[in-house]
Amino acid sequence: MTGKQAKKVLVIEDDQDLVALVSLLLQGDGYSVEIAGNGREALDALARELPDVILLDMKMPVMNGPEFARELEVRYGHQAPIIVLTAAADAHRRAAEVGADAWLGKPFDPDVLLSTVRRYAG
């Protein structure tokens, strides 16, 4: 591969303050970031380009995390690792239910977010 292209992270989250923080962290670490406010917007983004990693909130309007994960599997299989972001007390169980590769509880440590994304972005 010639040149270094930034790894792409799709952030699916409806909390705009959290989106701003996550985007700032990821872009500062050299990632290209695309934002979707819900699962429906995320599916539209996936139709354009598959990301290297997906950060997925569970509770969102229009199409929530579990609904998105099911549709992702139907349309694309498991081509991009999913990291679930959730405030749920049973975060690990919620992540397992959608076939996620990893999970982070909210609030999360910025360093842990970056190291987790690095681990799955390849």
Image: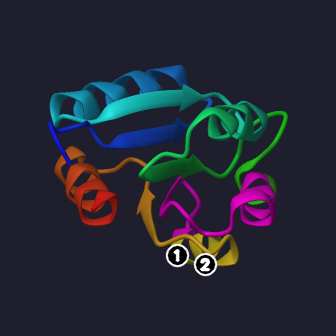
Amino acid at the residue labelled 2: Ala
The span shown in magenta is 68-91
Residue at horizontal 33%, vertical 50%? 108
Where residue 14 sits, quadrant-wise, is top right
| Residue 117 placement (x, y as % from top left) | 30, 55
> Per the image, is 4 magenta?
no
Q: 96 and 101: which one is in front?
A: 101
Q: Which mark is residue 96?
A: 2
Under circle 1, the secondary element is helix
Judge left or right: residue 28 versus residue 120: left
Between circles 2 and 1, the one closer to the viewer is 2
Callout 2–callout 1 Cβ contact below 8 Å: yes
Residue at horizontal 32%, vertical 57%? 121
> Per the image, is 85 magenta?
yes
Where residue 66 sits, quadrant-wise, is bottom right
Distance (Cα) linking label 2 and label 1: 6 Å
Answer above or below: position of 48 versus 65: above
Amino acid at the residue labelled 1: His
Judge left or right: residue 66 versus residue 42: right
Answer above or below: position of 101 versus 16: below
Residue at horizontal 54%, vertical 68%? 91
| Residue 12 placement (x, y as % from top left) | 58, 39
